Image (cartoon, helix red, strand yellow):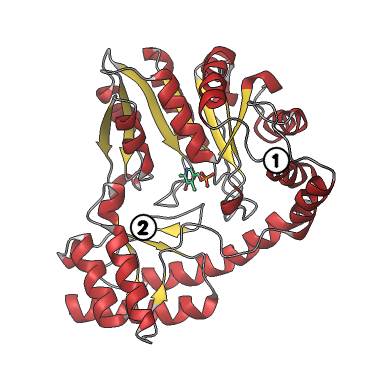
């Protein structure tokens, strides 16, 4: 469904129409130079052979240091697997640990691959719908209610793609209590951890204590923080036995992640972090403009997005479904956004601000005109 919108936008562009694209799911910046250089140097140094399936030892160490330092997660290198991106970590985990009949609780709106991965592992996604009144976040009561004797995982994604909202430390604590009460595991997808605004605070659920630490898998990667989507490097940390199972699976399916790409990832973690701050400041300026513009459009309601680079305004007042809304918006005003139905929420659309300021100014004007023409 979302590809249909993207394909139409591309076709319109080819016809010479001035299409403004808010569909991007990746930073619009290039990978920082020092990271590229480290990969080039690794190539020249002959890092071109098979490596350990779990990941290059130097990278495992750098990741363990990062998780201890930034997230207060006491992981050792043996708790970690390097994968072909955050997506691959999640896929490997589900393939390794899920059995038919197992249930995985996924709050909607969700990142679109979660339910598909669960189904690929012959398990059952249990979707819990959240709504605007709670900023599209699952409540402890909702989580409690969704848990059955078949529940294995609960997927927590903060900051969230597609909504951009974050769970506050208190909200994370309350969810952790429910998880511990029922002895399930949490998969904490923290890939947008560094993309936070207005002093918002990220808390890793596994840092709350040794009980919850034992029940946590943390999923992470380099794609979003360091603008490295095409490099395909991510990682997961968790209990040693489970990580070992994932390594065995990876060893017999994809083997090690591209060796020299891992050296780029080492430089990302161990090198200067100014690049992260620079990208964040650009995102932050765009967020301000886009949030003001969205809030000024009667007919849209946007939850406060404190992280990532997406906004997820509700379109329920327009009376349109998200496909109809996005098709009409593209057709009449040449603005491309992603229909919320792709993320399990048909009453909203996703607007990415991984694009330039000029596009944002023009696009928000067109969006306002479109909504006005529909709502009056
Ligand atoms: C982008 C993204 C990922 C993983 O991206 P990779 O490119 O595979 O590292 C994982 N979770 C969410 C929510 C994402 O938006």
Residue pictured at 57% horizontal, 16% vertical: 244
Q: Residue furthest bottom?
A: 16
Can residue 196 be seen by looking at this rendering? no
Mark 2 lies on a secondary structure that is loop
Disc ID at residue 270:
none
Question: Alpha carbon of mark 2 to alpha carbon of mark 1: how far?
Answer: 33 Å
Q: Is residue 30 left or right of residue 144?
A: right
Residue count near mark 2 (Cα–Cα under 10 Å), binned few <14, some 14–19, many ≥20:
many
Q: Mark 2 points at which residue?
A: 312
Q: Residue furthest left?
A: 319
From the viewer's side, name the closer residue of 143 and 101.
101
Residue pictured at 58% horizontal, 63% vertical: 284
Q: Position of residue 373 (x, y in %)?
A: 20, 81
Mark 1 lies on a secondary structure that is helix
Q: Residue furthest right?
A: 45
Q: Mark 1 points at which residue?
A: 262
Q: Where is residue 283 in the image (x, y as percent from the top left)?
A: 57, 63
Residue count near mark 1 (Cα–Cα under 10 Å), binned few <14, some 14–19, many ≥20:
many
């Amino acid at each position: 469904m979302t590809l249909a919108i993207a394909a139409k936008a591309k076709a319109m562009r080819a016809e010479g129409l001035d299409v403004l694209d808010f569909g991007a799911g990746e930073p619009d910046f290039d990978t920082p130079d020092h990271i590229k250089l480290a990969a080039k140097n690794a190539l020249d140094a002959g890092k071109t052979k098979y490596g350990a399936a779990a990941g290059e030892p130097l990278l495992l160490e750098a990741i363990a240091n990062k998780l201890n330092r930034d997230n207060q997660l006491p992981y050792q290198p043996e708790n970690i697997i390097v994968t072909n991106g955050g997506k691959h970590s999640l896929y490997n985990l589900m393939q390794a640990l899920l059995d038919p009949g197992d249930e995985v609780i996924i709050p909607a709106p969700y990142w679109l691959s979660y339910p598909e991965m669960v189904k690929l592992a012959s398990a059952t996604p249990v979707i819990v719908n959240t709504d605007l009144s709670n900023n599209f976040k699952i409540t402890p009561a909702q989580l409690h209610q969704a848990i059955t004797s078949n529940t294995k995982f609960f997927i927590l994604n903060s900051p969230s793609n597609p909504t951009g909202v974050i769970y506050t430390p208190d909200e994370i604590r309350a969810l952790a209590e429910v998880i511990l009460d029922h002895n399930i595991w949490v998969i904490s997808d923290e890939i947008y951890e560094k993309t936070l605004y207005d002093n918002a605070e990220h808390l890793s659920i596994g840092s709350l204590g040794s009980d919850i630490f034992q029940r946590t898998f943390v999923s992470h990667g380099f794609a979003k923080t360091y603008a490295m989507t095409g490099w395909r490097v991510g990682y997961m940390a968790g209990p040693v036995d489970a990580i070992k199972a994932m390594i065995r699976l990876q060893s017999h399916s994809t083997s090690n992640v591209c060796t020299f790409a891992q050296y780029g990832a080492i430089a990302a973690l161990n090198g200067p972090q100014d690049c992260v701050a620079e990208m964040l400041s650009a995102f932050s300026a765009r967020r301000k403009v886009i949030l003001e513009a969205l809030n000024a459009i009667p007919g849209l309601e946007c939850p406060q997005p404190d992280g990532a680079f997406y906004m997820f305004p509700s379109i329920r007042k327009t009376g349109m479904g998200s496909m109809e809304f996005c098709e009409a918006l593209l057709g009449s005003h040449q603005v491309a956004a992603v229909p919320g139905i792709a993320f399990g929420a048909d009453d909203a659309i996703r607007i990415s601000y991984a694009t330039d300021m000029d596009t944002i100014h023009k696009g928000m004007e067109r969006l306002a005109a479109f909504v006005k023409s529909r709502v009056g």
